[in-house]
Image: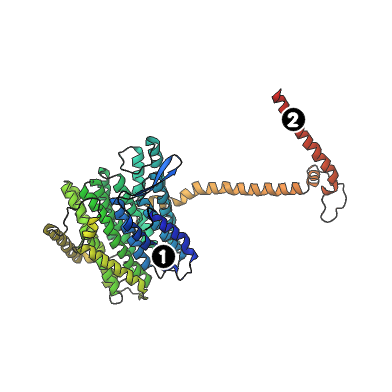
Amino acid sequence: MFGLLPPAFIYLAAALLLPLLPKGIRPWAFLVPPVLVLLQLSGLQHGDTLTWGFATFELTLLRVDALSMVFGWIFALVTLVAGIYALHNRNTGEQVSALLYSGSALGAVYAGDLFTLVFFWEIMAFASAYLVWARGTAAASAAAWRYLFVHIFGGSLLMAGVFLQVGETGSLAFDAFEGGAAAWLILLGFGVNAAMVPFHAWIADAYPRGTVTGSVFLSAFTTKTAVYTLARGFAGWDFLIWAGLIMALYGVTYAILSNDIRRVLAYHIVSQVGFMVAGIGIGTELALNGATSHAYTHILYKGLLFMATGAVLHATGRSRMTDLGGLYSRMPWVFWAYMVAALSISSAPFFSGFISKPMTISAAEYASTEVAVILLHLASVGTFLSVGLKLPFFTWFSKAPAVPIEVRPLPWNMYAAMGIGVFLNILLGVWPAPLYAILPYEVTFDPYALKNLKKGFQLLLATALVFFLIAQRLKPKAKIQLDTDWFYRAPKAFAWKTTVEPVAAFFAWGERASWGAAAWAVRWGRDPVGTLGRVMGRPSSVGRLAPGETASTTYRASMTLMMVVLLAGVLFLLAAVALGRIG
């Protein structure tokens, strides 16, 4: 539609124009850019590129291939659905930030060089932080700052790796890396955004504190953009297999222990991205198809999960399971929308997750990584236990709390967006062909083979039986949950006193000194004769001065002569120096 214009530019231009529109039109205008991007993507062909000369480098602003197109399609689609979910929101800052966030994620996906990637990577960090800060609470503000600092740290690792890479190779090309210090720094930079353990705590800290609508966007872009970059640059690295397995198990364990419903989902992002990272580490065509397709379906069902739990928060003002319960009779449609997403993330047959997650596990089986197979199945059990059983039971069916819950009506657009999410998750579950057709490699996996169906149903039924046997032991508790962020949150006061306060005190002293010097200069310049007389202890001999006069103004002629003599002396010295050099 727009030739080879990078899709990200459509979002960035819209972010600049949106604040100029009337307030009532802005939410609807927000839906135009993702529609235009979907039309733009339909006209792009594999192999299309757009380059731009910058200094001595050639930047690739657009690189179209099978891998980038998978992420491009889902990023544009989820922006449209999330925009519908947020139609009732009139916060211009959130709308602009969401466009910048979505656009920068697209820009990173289509970047063919490391400079362009880093440029969009940093925009993504700042734009997403605003969606946490915009909730307006003290906890959200603090979480947004921590989120931003963690991502600045990750971006610094990435930038350092890029500088080393350019120094070693002289190239900014973003392709597969072969090893070395530069590659490892870049990998760690990607790993922060992918929420690799132990760099993962930002996600459980920030996402539950984001705005109701902003968290839907947050669930889609940062970690999945990192998955894309890992698949592009580090496919087949064994390190990623173990990093992914740790993520899958660590995330699901903390999700089971969590009380806040959106914190449960945040930890499950860590776990589910772990499946993708492990698949990238395996590196076979089947595994990469599994990781890519799982990123696609994860965005759909995780977005629906955050929409449903966000609807609970919007309607009740509560998000902790210990403060919820008995909501089914008052929010039945939200429950069923949630369950579609919960069954999808649990890889239930005929739902979207079933066509993607088992593909990664099957790739692990073919690669003879038996430990990975067992641990990924274990993580799948924990997923259904926490997201598919514990959370809905204690939110919608357990005994209502002693303090009555007021349930406010939801805007129609929330129901509409959740309805679209339900439709897409079921559609892909029963008809995976459209997704399989755009994956990087030819798909040889059949999710509905008898062995896969048996395995899927057996895991679900066994997990459901275990839950009903130990449901009371899984009852949520209102406790503080420590994670690896403790290591940079606990020493905050000490670090502030030893690093920030001394620097602040030095600059405060400099400011005071500067103002004092400026005040002295003003007094001297206004009346140099009077000031000199006071310094020398000789009061002015002018006598009583008229209003507006100073000792200096009464000696105007003398001062003029003095300045002429001074200027002549300076010119004489300069001439002497010049003549001396010539001689």
Can see residue 390?
A: no
Q: Earlier in the sequence, mark 1 or mark 2?
A: 1
Residue 112 appears anywhere in the view: yes
The residue tagged 1 is: 30
Amino acid type, residue under disc 2 in the picture: Ala
Q: Nearer the viewer, residue 43 or 403?
A: 43
Farthest residue in the left direction?
450
Secondary-structure class at tag 1:
loop
The quarter holding residue 25 reads: bottom left
Q: Which residue is drawn at the image coordinates 79% and 35% (left, top)?
A: 568
In percent of the image, x 85 and y 42: which residue is there? 558
- Image position of 324 with respect to 55: above or below: below
Question: Could you tell me the amino acid type at mark 1?
Answer: Phe
Quadrant assignment for the N terminus: bottom left
Tag count in the figure? Answer: 2
Q: Quadrant of residue 157?
A: top left
- Could you say whether the residue bearing mark 2 is in a helix, strand or loop? helix
102 with respect to 341 (left or right):
right
State if disc 2 and disc 1 touch (CB < 8 Å).
no
Mark 1 crowd level (few <14, some 14–19, many ≥20, 10 Å Cα): many
Tell me residue 358's x, y (percent).
19, 56
Spatial CA distance of label 1 from label 2 is 69 Å
Q: Residue at x 36, y 62 (%)?
A: 79
Horizontally, residue 435 falls left or right of residue 52, namely left
Question: Residue 575: which disc?
Answer: 2
Please state the horizontal and vertical placement of residue 106, each as a whole percent of the image. Answer: 37, 54
Q: Dot 2, how many residues are within 10 Å of its Cα: few (below 14), some (14-19), or many (20+)?
A: few
Quadrant including the C terminus? top right
Residue farthest top in this picture: 583
Left or right, residue 453 beside residue 346 = left
**Nearest the eye: 407 or 570:** 570
Could you say where residue 172 lies in the image, as x and y percent from the top left? 38, 41
